[in-house]
Image (spheres, rainbow, N blue to C red):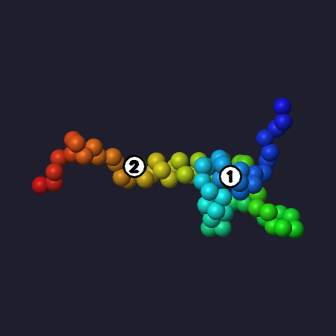
Amino acid sequence: MAAEPRFLTLDDVADVLNISVSQAYALVRNRELAAIKIGGRGQWRVERDRLEDYIARMYDQTREFIAAHPFVDPETAKPSE
């Protein structure tokens, strides 16, 4: 059984996150997702651990957002007085 590759292409990152390659590139360019540029053609690579760190940060940010913006069921919410 082959080991998982250490580095992922932006195509791979896009597949994992279910986003477009251009969105994955934007995450790298705006420094939300750490990556390296390698080779003569400057291919971007993202270390698998860095992608997992990014995903964990997004879970943390989502939890913080939900805590700051609790869900209110419009059917049971009382009007403001």
> Which amino acid is tagged 1?
Val
**SS class, disc 1:** helix
> Which amino acid is tagged 2?
Ala
Query: Could you tell me which residue is drawn at 61 percent across and 49 percent down?
Result: 17
**Crowdedness of circle 2 by 10 Å Cα count: few (<14), some, many (20+)?**
few
- Give the residue at the far left of this rendering: 81
What label does residue 13 carry, if any?
1
Q: Along the line of sight, which residue is nearer the eye, 35 or 13?
A: 13
- Give the residue at the far top of this rendering: 1
Q: Is residue 70 above or below residue 21?
A: above
Q: Along the line of sight, which residue is nearer the eye, 12 or 34?
A: 12
Quarter of the figure with the C terminus: bottom left
Residue 52: x, y in percent? 66, 47
Q: Which residue is mark 2?
A: 67
| Pair 2/1: label in front | 1
Residue 7: x, y in percent? 78, 51
